[in-house]
Structure formats: structure tokens, C-alpha cells
Amino acid sequence: MFFLTKKIILDCDPGHDDAVAMILAYGNPEIDLLAVTTVAGNQTLEKVTYNARSVSTMIGMTDVPIAAGSSKPLVQAHEPADVHGESGLDGTELPEPEVPLSDAHAVDLIIETIMRNPAKTVSLVPTGSLTNIALAARKEPKIVDRVKEVVLMGGGYHEGNWSAVAEFNIITDPEAAYIVFNENWKVTMVGLDLTHQALATPEVFNKIKNINTQPSKFLGELLEFFKAMYKESQGFDSPPVHDPCTIAYLIDPSVVDTMSVPVSIELNGNLTRGMTVADFRYPIPENCNTAVATNLDRNKFWELIYDALKNIG
Ligand code: PIR
Ligand code: CA
């Protein structure tokens, strides 16, 4: 099948699964990765930015600009996610970054990249807290009309991981999420309901190992660490690899089923702050510009990951 190349900006906080998203975005020929921007989330801004550059170096991605963004959420204090370890990418030896860091702030690089490209050609793919994206929409409101769509990893309509009802990327900056979900652009939420289907099973580990390249070894080590942490902290036998599900959806929409429903961000609940409240009641309003991901074609998803690794070599 023939797909048109999709231009994307990956805004991330690597992060084990963010690293897999970078690999998929760079290794898949349908994706034109215009920029990688970073945001404090899984670890401090300094650490996740180092990690983004280190992963880029490992996979030979020397031609994609990397810019650092917000070091803090809009309102609350920053809180790292311990499942990624002290470095944010524990479990392997990270290569010394050989790719430069852009002088631009992530927010400016995001705006500049969207405005320089034709309207409705660039998709924004946030896989961390939504701070940079919210700030970009506020600093240059024209981007809202101009982007093709926002496909983000975050939230969940029936699942939480950081509270009973909230997911890490949303609860770490709910005000930013509120801005992003309420702007007049198309937002597809690839949340925990979907990403908890993207489990790195023993079969997946084997397949990755058998590819037998430096990047596949690197990825195998990262996933081993993630697996151990997920077992210890959340009781999973196989760890969910959240972030690349966004990219997989953009490459081939048949990998991820979605449903268009209104989604609102809870800011005030004592128990529910950071919840992504999806309203499945009939009828769905006509002007609904939010959608949620529901079902993953697991085989197609993992095949995309293997192919990307093979392409990277
Ligand atoms: C945070 C993450 C993953 C696992 C836990 N327990 C906490 C990060 C991932 O990088 C992903 O983007 C999202 N946040 C999943 O909640
Ligand atoms: Ca992430």
C-alpha cells in the first residue's frame, strides 16, 4: 500500500518508550521527522534532553534538530517518573551525544517549523507533558489552524497510572492539557486504554534481539529495564510501550481504532485532577474535534517497530 509522507514534530521526555517513538519515527519511511523537542516529564529537562541527543546519536539521526523546552509545568512543581530510573533512560550505556542542541527554545522551534511548512501538513506528536504545546499555542495562536492534527500519548478514558483516574503526562501538567484539549484543532488521545495493549512480550524481546544491530541491542537493554520496573511498580509481566503508538497511528491509521468523542480535562477534582473525561453518550456532537484511541492491532504495531529497527540498521 502507498502512504503519503507525514511530517511530524515529536515533543517528548525520553524515557524508554519515548526512545522507541524516536526509533519508529526515524526508521519508518512514511514519517518525515522535522524536529524533536523536549519537555520536563519523566526526568528533568536537562536529563531528557541529554537522552534525546544520546538516542539520536545511537540511531545515527544527525539531521533532525533537537531543542529543549519547558523545565517546569505551567502551574505545579515538576515531579519525575521513577519507572525510568535516575537518568530517565536507565538500563543501558548511553552514548555520549554527538548531535548538537539547537539554540532555539522548543516552543519557538515548534512555531517556526509549523509556520514555515504549508498549512495542514505538519502533525504535532506530544509524548510527554503538554507544557511546550500549550505555550506554543498561546505564543503563536496561528499554529492552531495551521497544524494538521495533534496525536498525543496521554490520558485514558477508563484507566489511570499516576492516580486512580489520571495518567502521568496529563496529571504532571493538567493546565497545559486543558489548553491543548480545548483549542480548535483535532486532538487524538492515544491513552492508556490503547497503550496497555502494546505490551513487549517475550516474543517481542526475541524478535528485537534477533535483529542483532547496535540499536536493537540498545533497545533490548532499555526494554529489559522497563520490564523489571513495570513488574515491580505496577505488576505487569510485560511492559506497555506507550509512546510509539502515536507514530504507528500516523503511519497507518488501521493499526489504531479511534472514536470521536468529547474529552474534557478535570482541573479541580480532589480525587480526579488530571482525569481525561471522555463522554461516550449518544449523540456525539457534530463539531467534536477530539478522538480517543480504542483498539490496537498488535501484530501490525510490532512489525512497524521491527521494520524501523531494520531500516536504521
Ligand atoms: C510515566 C511514563 C511511563 C510509565 C510510568 N509509570 C510513568 C511515561 C511514558 O514515557 C509515557 O509517555 C507516559 N508517561 C505513560 O504514562
Ligand atoms: Ca513519554
Image: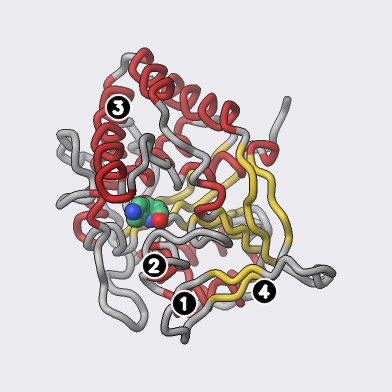
* Front position among marks 1 and 3: 1
The reply to whether callout 4 and callout 3 are in contact (CB within 8 Å) is no
> What distance separates the C-alpha of mark 2 from that of mark 4?
28 Å
Q: Which residue is identified by label 3? A: 220
Q: Quadrant of the C terminus?
A: top left
Q: Which residue is identified by label 1? A: 272
Q: Which mark is residue 163?
A: 2
The spot of residue 16 in percent (x, y) is 32, 43
The spot of residue 44 in percent (x, y) is 22, 62
> What distance separates the C-alpha of mark 2 from that of mark 3?
29 Å
Q: Is residue 64 above or below residue 121?
A: above
Which element type, helix, strand or loop, lies under badge 1? loop
> Which residue shows up at 50% across the image and 22% down it?
307
Amino acid residing under circle 1: Thr
> Which residue shows up at 60% across the image and 28% down it?
300
Q: Which residue is identified by label 4? A: 184
Callout 4 crowding tier (Cα within 10 Å): few <14, some 14–19, many ≥20: some
> What distance separates the C-alpha of mark 4 from that of mark 3?
40 Å
Q: Is residue 23 left or right of residue 95?
A: right
- Dividing the image into four equal quarters, which quarter contains ligand 1? bottom left
Q: Is residue 166 left or right of residue 265?
A: left
